Image (cartoon, coloured by chain):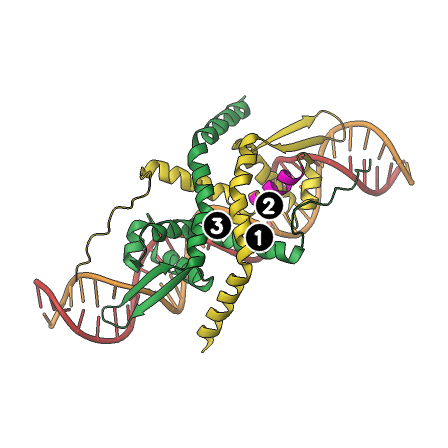
Chain colours: A green, B yellow, C red, D orange
Amino acid sequence: MKQPPVPVKPWPESDPAVDALVTEVIGRVADKWTMLVLEVLADHSELRFTQISRLVPDVSQKMLTQTLRQMERDGLVVRTVFPVVPPRVEYRLTDLGLSLGAAFCGVWRWAEENLRRIEAARAEFDARQKR
Amino acid sequence: MKQPPVPVKPWPESDPAVDALVTEVIGRVADKWTMLVLEVLADHSELRFTQISRLVPDVSQKMLTQTLRQMERDGLVVRTVFPVVPPRVEYRLTDLGLSLGAAFCGVWRWAEENLRRIEAARAEFDARQKR
DNA sequence: TATGACGCTCTCTTTTTGGTTAGTATAATT
DNA sequence: AATTATACTAACCAAAAAGAGAGCGTCATA
């Protein structure tokens, strides 16, 4: 039995190359540590490495370094090194980083507002499965 | 040299338990496949398994099944099985799923609008590193 | 009789990710 | 003279995630 061909999606841009890039960017940016760092940096305009590590629970040095490097590379944060000893490095969001924070705000709020619903859905699903 | 204590973050809710849950939910929901499935389902209100797999580029059966199950468990999609042969299963977003799609729209748009900037930042960063 | 469609599940292997530990430089502190 | 603080890097290893491939049950088509 042949299915009718799937209609072309009416999304504004359907350029596969752009799609792929957007997907990649979102995948990169929507990761757990990036979001948490984004949040703390949105709250405190300027932070040092260890301050961030204290504010983001359970982040390892390795992950924090990695995340900050990526964010720097993507133009989300600026990293300022003060040539003093012991070293002092400060991080702050760029305008791009701030705008991403604003965009994510919607998702963050959605998660807060719908936590209950999700938990309820999960409980119901699990109960249904057990039967 | 002792740093002054980091100020408490002025975020609306600072309940660590809620924070953890929100983080977990976002982590789950902000994953690549979930977002892509969300997008195609937001575009076509009702789709069958193979239709989705054709619309989401490079998704393996395994990942698609997994993603759809998770989304169903979280109450984002409804799965309707028609007891016919060959099997027919339809997926559609719930209201919760639609609202998540709306929330993500902002991030999606952000990514589209700022692709260039990100690519430019990366290029600049990489060039700076090479020196 | 063989093949394909559908919506999966199961197993095996590869890739990716993340944690842990050790090390670096140098000035100030104990 | 030893220790502490800072912001890392590098190496190694375990765990988790993802990809590849086979199989399944049944009906319709070739």
Q: Determine the main secondary structure of the stretch shown in magenta.
A: helix
**Splitting the image into 4 quarters, where does residue A47 fall?**
bottom left
Which mark identifies residue A23? Answer: 1
Please report whichever mark, 3 or 1, sits nearer to the chain's N-terminal start: 1
Q: Camera-side residue: A29 or D21? A: A29
Which mark identifies residue B23? Answer: none
Residue A99 % position (x, y): 45, 53
- Magenta extent: B35-44
Residue A1 % position (x, y): 82, 35
Do discs 2 and 3 belong to a common subunit?
no
How many badges with numbers are in the image? 3
Q: Is residue A2 left or right of residue B76?
A: right
Q: Amino acid at mark 3?
A: Ala
At mark 2, the secondary structure is helix
- Parent chain of label 3: A
Which residue appears at 52% of the width and 52% of the height? B110
**Splitting the image into 4 quarters, where does residue A90 fall?**
bottom left
Q: Camera-side residue: A32 or D9? A: A32
At mark 3, the secondary structure is loop
Label 2, label 3: how far apart the Cα atoms are: 13 Å
The C terminus of chain A - image quarter: top right
Which mark identifies residue B36? Answer: 2
What residue occupies the far top of the structure in this picture? A131
Q: Amino acid at mark 1?
A: Thr
Which mark identifies residue A30? Answer: 3
Residue C21 % position (x, y): 30, 59
Q: Amino acid at mark 2?
A: Leu
At mark 1, the secondary structure is helix
Which residue appears at 47% of the width and 61% of the height? A74
- Parent chain of label 2: B
